Amino acid sequence: MSATSMDGTPSVDGETWFELVFDIPANQAFTYRIDEKGEAAVGKRAMVPFGKRGRDSLGFIVATREAPPEGLSESQIKQIRRVVDTDPVFDDRDIALAEWIAAYYLCGIGQAIATMIPSGRRLVSYPSLSGGSDDIAAAPLELSEEQITALESIISPIPGPRSPIPELFYLYGITGSGKTEVFLRAAEWMLKQGKSVIYLVPEIALTHQTAELIGRRFGSAAATLHSGMTSSARFAEWSRIRRGEAPIVVGPRSAVFAPVHNLGLIIIDEEHDGSYKSGNTPRYHARQTAIRRCSVEGAKLVMGSATPSAEAWKLMAEGTIKRLDLSRRLAGGSMPEIKAVNLAKTAGCLTEELKEEIRITARMGRQTILFLNRRGFAHCFHCPSCGCEHKCRRCSVSLIWHKSKGRALCHYCGYSEPPPSACPQCGSLEAGYRGFGTEMIEEEVRRTFPELRIRRADADTVGKSGMLEETIAQFKAGLVDILLGTQMVAKGLNFPGVRLVGVVLADTGLHMPDFRATERTFSLIVQVAGRAGRYFPDGKVIVQTLRMGDTVISRSCALDVDGFFNAELAQRQALQFPPYTRIIRLNARSREAARADTAMERLASIAAPLIPADADMLGPSECPIGIINGNHRRQLILRGKSMGTLHAAARILMERYDKGRDAKVYVEIDVDPVSLL
Ligand code: ADP
Ligand code: ZN
Ligand code: ZN
């Protein structure tokens, strides 16, 4: 990239030619002539004619050049029609990071830039979103011994020359052990050194809670980014950060790109959370991206969780990540008593034990959380006479009966139809729904406890923005006795009044054909259990299960993280799955099954000779969910000891594949996939 002035002044030295990239899967820049007004500059977005039809498209100006590319005359080069931004919205540091994203996640550099930068436009004046006030919260807590030790390790410089690997820390401690306080102190210290901090949190619920806390602590020095904001609000916060007015930024995954000045620290709260991995191209992971940023910008990285990911656990065991333990609850609570209960012989979805504990809790004037990771009323329609299952017309998954809507609904594509009253294939009246969702639990809980105030929080009830916040606020204020719901009630929320947590069915994720299924189940149970007894020592957790002897269930109930990972990592090593190997997944989808198959076979035959010696190839095969929304899905998995050689193979593979590719098949690459469904 050429060195252009980055302060937004039009190209004084008379640059005429600019290189633009677009939000497309190509690693190529295109040359354009300066716009009529002469506003073009590196770091701005511009509308230019692009593609075969020359339609106006948004491009990102990434470089200047002295002359048109060889072989092109000046008249052949199109002109920039209109420059979008008055001031640059990205700089050389962002471009370098985008180049890394493109190389690591095998996408176009324009796709990377488009992901990094909020799509909004500058507003003339926008009130500051966070805090607004500068009065900083009251007397600070006195840190515990463990907190002090952790904080000191994080902030003290390591002697000697800077290593290419950034300093990585992990605050490992049960929920409520004071991790947040250590994060905040480390952030405070960094700000005092004149450095900036990025504080990453999982999606949605937790963003607000942490943003509030940080707003109170740091006033207008804090900026908040989250997906609920309008794009212009996001853009306004982004601009404030870029101007250096907000040295501490809190937000989900994409906040890892925040254009802070002089980065000193990135914090990743709840490191194990799946939302740190993007579900769209580029499928970047915030943790990997944070490590990259920290190493380039000389910053430190601190992660934290009660249930680290298997990757992080292994790196801690090897000493690459420095583990800092917090072993006690500090606000008067202790870890709750956790009991596994057999659900097999119960007619409804609540065992006698769980009902009794709900009663006791209500009598004490305290609160209950009921958790189930499935929304809707009932799952899987099944006919015992002919074996028919009621599946979506467009996907290879069962329709879920939503009683309140009176429809059977597909959770993957939104298709719905009236629920059948008899078997659609053989007419048998024996056929019906089995399995339960949050809607059915709500019905049973209301019937069993008519005198209690009950609220449900899942994607169906809190779809409208603000609803989840309202439900949470009511629960926090003690206006609700039982909060029941999906993940939304499990993640990081901090409710003082909670005595009892009931996991209605712990096994829902275990049958998933994914090597991370047990890890996810373990971490979810431990996380949900952590919602109980944060402030009082009498917390109770009832874990209902149909797999009484299962070690995942018993280890999560014993909060035996060591035992779990010893077994889990041994298994992963035996089966050669991450973190002992690295994976690149190629996913092909098409309306026509035959086309998807052909494309996959071609990919596999090109890949075969490219596979490095320390790697292998799984598939091609149908994805576990074979059809989604009418698209037939196939996959090929490249698996190897080193990402370097896998990357090289995948790059050549895609180049060769693209030369004769079928336009009716969409191929997507996922580096370090977190889900193989
Ligand atoms: P975690 O992030 O590990 O889940 P938090 O940081 O939310 O835990 O802390 C849980 C509770 O403990 C909070 O209410 C917090 O104010 C309190 N707390 C944290 N550190 C201390 C301390 N040193 N002394 C007393 N209470 C503390
Ligand atoms: Zn039938
Ligand atoms: Zn569907």
Image (tube, rainbow, N blue to C red):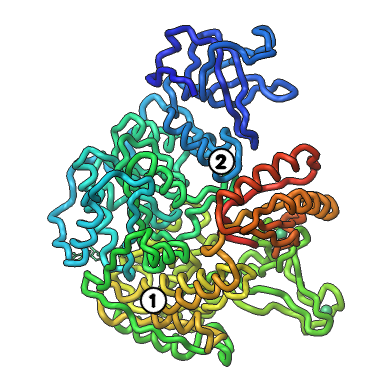
The amino acid type found where label 1 is placed reads: Thr
Q: Quadrant of ligand 1?
A: bottom left
Q: Residue under circle 1? A: 368
Q: Foreground: 227 or 334? A: 334
Q: Position of residue 300 (x, y in %)?
A: 32, 48
Q: Foreground: 67 or 538? A: 67
Q: Position of residue 236 (x, y in %)?
A: 39, 33
Q: Residue under circle 2? A: 103
Q: Residue at x 54, y 73 (%)?
A: 518
Q: Residue at x 48, y 13 (%)?
A: 39
Q: Foreground: 170 or 255? A: 170
Residue 643 located left or right of residue 449? right
Q: Are marks 2 and 1 in contact (CB under 8 Å)?
A: no
* Ligand 1 within 8 angstroms of badge 1 C-beta: no
Q: Position of residue 117 (x, y in %)?
A: 48, 35
* Number of other residues with Cα within 10 Å of mark 1, as a class: few under 14, some 14 to 19, many 20 or more: many
As drawn, 543 above or below 118: below
- State the image quarter where residue 648 is shown: top right
As drawn, 195 above or below 537: above
Q: Position of residue 259 (x, y in %)?
A: 38, 35
Q: Residue at x 39, y 60 (%)?
A: 270
Alpha carbon distance from label 2 to label 1: 48 Å
